[in-house]
Amino acid sequence: MKCHACGFEWSAETETCPACGAPTREETSGTGEDIYHRGVLAEKAGKKNTAARHYAAAADLGVPLAAWGVCRCLDRAENPDLYEFWLLTASERDPIAAMAYATYLRRGGDGIGAFRYLHRAAALGSDEAREKLAWYYLRHKNRPAARYYLNRTHGRCFAAVLRLFVGREPEYAPETPVAPDDTVEMYKIGAYAERLGLPHIAFSYYEKAADASYLKAVERVAEMYMRGQGVTRDVRNVVKYLRILGAAGKTEAYLTLADYYETGLLDGAPNPAAATEAYRLAADHGDVRGMTLLADRLADGIGTDRAPEEALTLYDRAAALGSEDAKKRAAALRRVAAEEYAAGVKVSEANPADAYRHFRNAAATGHAEALCAVGDALIAGSGCDKDNHAAVDAYLRAAERGSARALYRMGCLYLYNYGVRYDEKLARACLTGAKRGGIAAADAKLTELENRKKRHAAQKLYAASCVIYHRGDHASAAKFRYAAAKLGHAKATYLLGCMYDCGDALPKDAARANVLYARAKLLGFDGKETGFYGKYLRGLNDMK
């Protein structure tokens, strides 16, 4: 294949020349309509540069819409001059391009040129351009010109027609002499039509403004869909537009939606679950009333599972934002929980099952001591089935809420490897917190934890000494046994005495050996009575 532009030859079939990027001869062959169609296909495939070349070739052959196609494919920021050239070329034949060029000139500060090309777009059949010109002439008191363009807009400018023929001026004043194509103006036109008793026209303008995310219009569209005013009643669109309002920060729209669900105005029957979900949306967006109403439903289990603890959290959030009502309801909920806990304590000895029920009711609101009492009952199986995992969960929740008793319980569980795995660090942290919280028994448990830690370290040293001793390094083994003996390991103490007694890698010292024997006996190990001393001597002789 040979390029018609630069003469480069290549073998593979490609759309453009690899050397200069010019289109192949096959692409430029055919009528202008054929080349324009190739440009359309290239544009749909996302090949903007190829499409621009096809459109340019088609424009040279006189295809009316091709120049506007070039504009669509050009990057205005990269090729401003080229873009302006093709836009000017397109505006001579295409009304859309003429409108675009008018906007381009207006943004560039050329108001007269923009007005001229607005007239050109109107002459080429653009209803939008005629509408803009009608508004312009109407505001400048040129009614004949306004009437001329209004008669050619096919009913698009209803409000302007009313101005001319009904003889009533709207209550709002135009802000600028530019055609009112923004969303605020659309909304105002809709409001004017609604005041004149023309809801269908009003709805059409409200909907245009709503589609451009003008919130006042969104609110009116939702209300008109709800009432069936100017449009067929449509529940799905009511929900859609109210959710748009809520997501944009108008959280009262969620409350309105919840009210519709709760009263059955949407579905024909009350829908508590949907109402609760709407309240949750309002609460998630920071609406204080939404938080309070959602908390009410969570506390009573309306439209959702009962969750008094979450309700209390929401009441507290709303109270922190200044809601006195939420503050009172939170206090009432806490008072009920305290009464339930006191009732459980009162009957705990006489009726454990009844006490457990009271504790559970109080714990549902996050009452710390009630949660701890539930954990105690589950650990002991008092009034309920024994469940260590559930007990640990209850203790942890109580500890998070500041219960020193729950911290003490968790410290003991970590210490004794009960319900949870032994963890010296967590046990110390929990018991230290309990001690600070005034639990006197935590001090003794901390001492026990330290002793256990020493015993564990001593056992490891003793085991290491045995391994080293049997390898034949008696001097190093003596050092490990000495360290274990200092930590109170009875057997290591006795064996150290044996090494002094026999002069095994240590100086022979019968007096020191006897002291070590006595100390080992006090620690609970008497090697002579158990025959351990004779066994040691036999092992030592075997090694020799």
Image: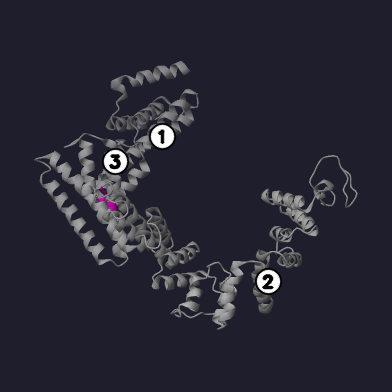
Image point (68%, 73%), residue name: 105
- Frontmost residue, 433 versus 87: 87
Choose top left, top right, bottom left or bottom right for residue 258.
bottom left
Q: Report which residue position mark 3 lands on.
A: 392
Mark in front: 1 vs 2: 2
Q: Amino acid at mark 2?
A: Arg
Q: Residues within 10 Å of mark 2 (few under 14, many from 20)?
A: many
- Frontmost residue, 463 versus 37: 37
Is residue 232 magenta-colored? no
Q: Report which residue position mark 2 lands on.
A: 120
Q: The N terminus lies in which quarter of the figure?
A: top right
Work out whether residue 439 can be spotted. no
- Give the percent coordinates (x, y) of residue 430: 31, 47
Which tag, 2 or 3, sits closer to the chain's start?
Answer: 2
Mark in front: 2 vs 3: 2
Q: Report which residue position mark 1 lands on.
A: 482
Mark in front: 3 vs 1: 3
Is 325 on the left-hand or right-hand side of 30?
A: left
Q: Amino acid at mark 3?
A: Val
Instruction: For mark 2, give the secondary structure.
Output: helix
* Residue numbers of the magenta segment: 306-310
Q: Amino acid at mark 1?
A: Tyr
Is 45 on the left-hand or right-hand side of 330?
A: right
Circle number at residue 98: none
- Give the percent coordinates (x, y) of residue 286: 37, 61
